[in-house]
Amino acid sequence: MTRSLIFGSLAGIASAVLVLTAASGPLGIMLGYLAPLPLFFAGLTHGVTAVGIAGVVGTLVSAVNGLLAGGVYLVTFAAPVAVVVRQALLARPATEASTGADVSDGLEWYPVGRVVLWLAGWSLGLFGIALLLTADREGGLPSMLQPLLTQFLSAMQQGAGQGADLEVMAKRLALLMPAVFGVSWLVMMTINGTLAQGMAVLLKQNRRPTPLYRSFTLSRSLAVALVAALVAAAVLPGDVAFIGGTVAAILAFPFFLQGLAVVHGLAARASLPGLVLAAFYAALVVAGALVGVLVVILGFIEEWAGFRRRFAGAGTSQEKN
């Protein structure tokens, strides 16, 4: 307990300091992006108690800038990391492990796909809170974001653009920003969690073996929810379309990860898997959204096509022959 208290406290202070540096410029923003890393590392090396202590300490340190800052830190970093770590460290005897389960040393570990679903659910929850907080405002959440975006665009263009054009652009961006924030938060949490696990393994302090990311799986019910959100965004009017589009963007992220798992699984069958993956990620960086959408579609289709299962079966057949 003493070790968890000390390590958790240090991790919480480090995380809060990283958040505070985000306002100091470009370098600070980069460091602020790593704010969840100490929390994840504390939990994945010292357990749920340590990450809980880290979250409390980080929240208290952040509250130095006001109760609002402390509350934002709590709901965006401390609480979700604690929940994710708690789920990630769940394990049971692998006496009746399901096919494709993450099994190591006689234990079946909580599936990494479900861990990502917890993150996606939390992101949706943050979006829901934002909707509730702006419900009494005419135009809701987009109308609150629009003046801020107009001011930002005006500063970026330094008066070069027309005011009306800026207003139109800001109005469109205001409808997109919640989805951008939601997905960006998911990316940040996923990267930091993965980095923390890698560091824990490197230092031989990990409590859980690194998940088999190529066996990443989701559920068809999530696919149905994604389709429903897309239909709402495309067909229904006004606020419902806005909500549907944001929900669809957030729900698409787990399928993006599943698409990456398919790519890694297929690349593993190539004679030069490293080269294949390097080419793929280069295309992802260059083409960006286009390749990203294709990866999401691949991950979505995987729910029914089972590419990894088929190729695994084909590989087994070839070995027998």
Image (spheres, grey):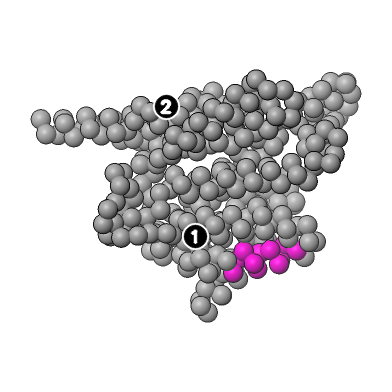
Circle 2 sits in a helix, a strand or a loop, which is it? helix
Whether residue 286 is situated above or below residue 86 in the rendered picture = above
Whether residue 232 is situated above or below residue 111 in the rendered picture = above
The residue at 29%/56% (across/down) is: 94
Identify the disc placed on residue 306.
Answer: none
The residue at 74%/30% (across/down) is: 239
Disc 2 designates what residue? 301
On screen, residue 162 versus residue 270, left or right, reads right
Residue 176 visible in this rendered orientation of the protein: yes
**What predominant SS class does the magenta segment belong to?**
helix
Looking at the picture, tell me which residue is in the foreground, 231 or 196.
Answer: 231
Marks counted in the figure total 2
The range drawn in magenta is 53-63
On screen, residue 78 versus residue 164, left or right, reads left
On screen, residue 197 versus residue 253, left or right, reads left
Whether residue 263 is situated above or below residue 290 in the rendered picture = below
Residue 151 visible in this rendered orientation of the protein: no
Circle nearer the N terminus (1, 2): 1
The residue at 26%/57% (across/down) is: 95
Q: Alpha-carbon neighbours of circle 1 within 10 Å: few (<14), some, or many (≥20)?
A: some
Looking at the picture, tell me which residue is in the foreground, 147 or 118.
Answer: 118
Residue type highlighted by circle 2: Ile
Residue type highlighted by circle 1: Arg
Q: Position of residue 125 (x, y in %)?
A: 64, 46
Instruction: Give the image quarter of residue 161.
Output: top right
